[in-house]
Structures are given as C-alpha cells and as structure tokens.
Amino acid sequence: MYRFLLTPRWWGINLFVVLAIPFCVFMGTWQLGRFEDRVQTHEAAEKQPAPGTRAAKPIDELLPVDTVTSGRPATATGRYADQFLVPGRKLDDRTGFYVVGMLRTDSGRALPVVRGWLPGKAGHTSVPPAPAGDVTVTGDLQASESTGTAGVDAKGGLPDGQVGMISAASLVNLVPYDVYDAWVTLQRSDVRTGGAETAGKGGEGTSAAALRPVPAAAAQGTGLDLKAFQNLGYLCEWFVFAAFVLFMWFRLVRREAEAVRDVRLGLVADPDTAGPDQEAAPDQEASADREAGTPADV
C-alpha cells in the first residue's frame, strides 16, 4: 500500500521533509543559544560594580569599548575645540538636546564629550560655553552610537552645528582631525551657571540653563529588552514550522494511502488504466452503431 513512497514524486517530497525538519530544529536551537547568551551577558553586567565605584583610567587603556569597559570611568586631558548639539534627546521624560564638546587630546585625536543635557530646542536655547584652556575630564565611557540606538536621528538634514548621532563615523566628516571611536558622558557638569553663549543662529539670547549630566546607558546586548525576547519568538516559530512540515507529510501520506486502498477495493477507477478505457469506449460504441446502420446520437 505504501509503495507509492518510492515513486519519483514522493522521493522529492521525502527529501524536502528530511532536510527541512533538521534545518528548522537547528535554527530554533540557534535562537535559543542567542537568548541564553543575552541572559548570561545581562547577569555578568549586573555583577559588575557600579560605574561610580570604579577607579577612572585613561581613555586609551579602555579601548576598544566592549561589554566590560562600557560604563567605566575614563579620563582624558586636552582642550575643547568644536561643539555640536544633538537634538531630540530625552531625559526624565522631557525632550531636549545633548551638548557635545570635541576635546582635542595630546595625541591629536578628539574625544566627544557629552557635557550635559539642556531642555528645549537645539539652536534656540542658550548653551554655556566650554571651559577654556587645558582641562581634564572624567566621564563614563560609551560606545559610538548606531542607527539602532534609541534617540538617534539618522535622517540627516540638520542645521550646521547639529548632529543626529554621536559616533566617529558621523563626526569625522565635520571636523579636520581624527575622532575617537567612543565618547564619554560627564559624571558632573563642567558648567553650572552663568557665562552663556547663544548656540547656533537665531538664538533667543536668554540666559543659559545649567547643564544636567546624562546618565551612562547600558552596553548594547547586555539587557533583557524586547530584542532578547524576540529570540524566543523566533525559536517558537522555527519549531512550529518543523511540526507543520511533519504534519503535512503525514496528511499527504494518509490521503495517498486512502486513494490506493479505494482503487484496490474497486471504489474508484485506477487513474493509470481507467483513462484509456474510458476514452476508447465511446469510439467502440460509435463503430458498432455505424455497422448497424443507426445514428450514433439518438
């Protein structure tokens, strides 16, 4: 009854099932491994001491930024050069912008330093000037932002003096010197009151508000966010697809076996033999009618 499984058509179906099910199981277990890696990374990050309890180290000793060095206090010495505003950034559910100063170090490269956050609209709010002369900053180390970072404006078209993303790739095209592939956010604002300068054209000339420090964000891939639980969703999808392939294979086999059984019991005509006989029967009747001298269609 099941000899049909050895036909060429069923060889193709069987080969697809044999390859599809292991592939789905492999992809499902891979997604599970990705989720477990995120859980382990999250647990390791939680065991790390708080950023404020760790001793600050020179920026060059903490690069490149990874899940271990992200958030570590870093120090750098230099002079502030260019300044940029990063609009559309929120702090405590309020919309404002970051103030980023490019700190030229002795190595010639510049370190983007988030001096703080101000409420309001970038370019229409007065910004305290950066300290003059040689300064030493201490801030929490952060990796360069990407298009997937929360708050990033990757559309472009911003006014001069504004950037949508804090990254070496975007800043190196705006300044005539090399930029560190990292940035720091100051633990304490370098300017509290007074000494305001208007940021950008069209400034209102109001007194500058105090810069608020921007808390360091957790390293990407260390939190149990929505992306982490998406791996579990993909795991379920792959296993469901494997079960669906197996279910459809059993259903096709059962339907084919029932068709073979009905042919053997004579309940239906054999499609391999009934077709020619059924086509030959009308011709035989027409020939017999002609021999008898009677019309074929009466």
Image: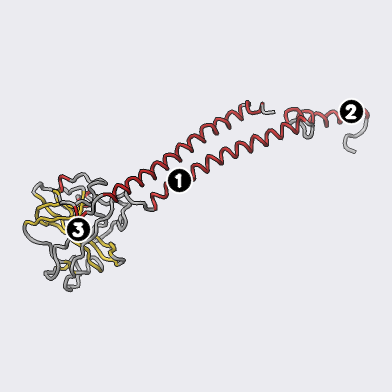
Q: Observer-nearest residue: 169 or 201?
A: 169
Query: Given this view, does label 1 or label 3 mark the residue nearer the observer?
Result: 1
The image quadrant where one finds the C terminus is top right
Determine the image quadrant of residue 37: top left
Tag 2 secondary structure: helix
Q: Residue at x 49, y 42 (%)?
A: 238
Identify the element where label 1 is drawn. helix
Q: Residues within 10 Å of mark 2 (few under 14, many from 20)?
A: few
Kind of residue indicated by mark 3: Val
Determine whether 279 is above or below 148 in the image. above
N-terminal of the two: label 2 or label 3?
3
Q: Which residue ends up furthest to the left in the rendered image?
A: 133
10 Å crowding of disc 1: few (<14), some (14-19), many (20+): some
Q: Does residue 5 sit above or below 220 in this rendering?
A: above
- The answer to whether residue 255 is above or below residue 91 is above
Question: Which SS class for mark 3?
Answer: strand
Question: Disc 1 and disc 3: Cα gap in Å?
Answer: 37 Å
The image shows residue 23 at horizontal and vertical percentages of 48, 35
Q: Quadrant of residue 291?
A: top right
Instruction: Give the residue drawn at x 88%, y 37%.
Output: 297
The residue tagged 2 is 288
Query: For mark 1, what is the residue?
Result: 234
Q: Quadrant of the N terminus?
A: top right
Q: Which of disc 2 and disc 1 is earlier in sequence?
A: 1
Hey, what amino acid is under mark 2? Answer: Ala
Q: Which mark is residue 114?
A: 3
